[in-house]
Image (cartoon, coloured by chain):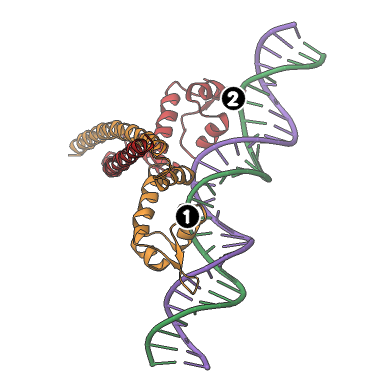
Chain colours: A red, B orange, C purple, D green
Amino acid sequence: MKISELEQRTGVSRHTLRYYEKQGLLLEVSRQGNNYRDYPEQAVKRVNMVRQLKDLGFSLREIFDVLDALRKDTMDCAQGAVLMAQKRAVVDAKIAELEALRLLLTEEQQQLERSAKAQDLQHQ
Amino acid sequence: MKISELEQRTGVSRHTLRYYEKQGLLLEVSRQGNNYRDYPEQAVKRVNMVRQLKDLGFSLREIFDVLDALRKDTMDCAQGAVLMAQKRAVVDAKIAELEALRLLLTEEQQQLERSAKAQDLQHQ
DNA sequence: CTTGACCTTCGAGTTCACTCTATACCTTAG
DNA sequence: CTAAGGTATAGAGTGAACTCGAAGGTCAAG
């Protein structure tokens, strides 16, 4: 798959794809005879995973660490498991934080709705 | 409360606090006779909320919009409630995404642990 | 009345994650 | 053969969010 197709299928610009590659996030890229990049099918998934982790607040460096651990799964399993557990802890903490915030936002919202109603009544 | 106390209690540097103020995220700041900032108790909560929202991936501009809506609660409650509901939807989506990711990471981790054990056995 | 620890503003510098531009090579349709 | 359009690299530019430092005002202790 050429870069434009990967761009199309992931919604990530070719500039950004090359940038990710430079940052070590996309290593499984071979070249055709003409030096064009040739991505395997798997690259779509990989790019999507990078995007997902990024949206969750991980830096590209942290994502690199995760992918690096996953890639070396035949070599350094115990270490990989530890890293994975650490990431999971971070994710767990984020979930807890988000749930607290959701509560807070719900409260604020209810308060605003009550105020809105009170105002409506005044106007009548 | 002076800036150093707020810095202490929120873990946000004085530089960043002043920066947030410039961005309109900390409007309830009065001045003492000597021109020192004098924060109300409430500022701690406000700063923490900014941080929390930021960690969840909101830009400072978006956070400004939320706080702006909250501040105008006597004026524009219905709109504020809508905004709040929108933010809550985003938060809900993030929670779902995180939970999916947690599952994925758990699976990866278990696989790695199994591999590690298999390797250990081979070595014996 | 000086010393040290605060505080002020302003503006420059940094890091991250892109985003774009320039220059040049490759490929395919007409 | 040429023109359009895809691809390559290198490097500059951008915007967000800090982060720092200089130059100077304030204050309480000794």
Which dot marks residue B20? 1
Indicate the secondary structure of the residue bearing disc 2.
Answer: loop
Q: Residues within 10 Å of mark 1 (few under 14, many from 20)?
A: some
Along the line of sight, which residue is nearer the eye, A53 or B32?
Answer: B32
Residue A87 seen in render: no
Q: Residue at x 55, y 24 (%)?
A: A3
Q: How crowded is mark 2: few (under 14 residues within 10 Å), some or many (20 or more)?
A: few
Where is residue C22 shown, x and y percent of the image? 74, 36
Tag in front: 2 or 1? 1
Measure the alpha-carbon separation of dots 2 and 1.
46 Å
Residue B9 quadrant: bottom left
Residue B124 seen in render: yes
Quadrant occupied by the N terminus of chain B:
bottom left
Q: Identify which amino acid the numbered label 2 is placed on.
A: Tyr
Q: Is residue B11 left or right of residue D7?
A: left
Q: Which residue is drawn at 40% across and 68% down?
A: B4
Q: Which residue is drawn at 24% across and 34% down?
A: B115
Along the line of sight, which residue is nearer the eye, C10 or B76?
Answer: B76
Residue B25 sits above or below residue D27 on the image: above
Q: Identify which amino acid the numbered label 1 is placed on.
A: Tyr
Indicate the secondary structure of the residue bearing disc 1.
Answer: helix
Which dot marks residue A36? 2
Q: Check whether the beta carbons of the residues at disc 2 and disc 1 lie within 8 A of each other.
A: no
Residue B116 sits above or below residue A38 on the image: below
Q: Residue at x 40, y 50 (%)?
A: B50
Where is residue A60 shown, x and y percent of the image? 45, 41
**Number of residue marks:** 2
The subunit carrying tag 1 is B
The subunit carrying tag 2 is A
Along the line of sight, which residue is nearer the eye, A51 or B110?
Answer: A51
Residue A61 quadrant: top left
Which dot marks residue B118? none
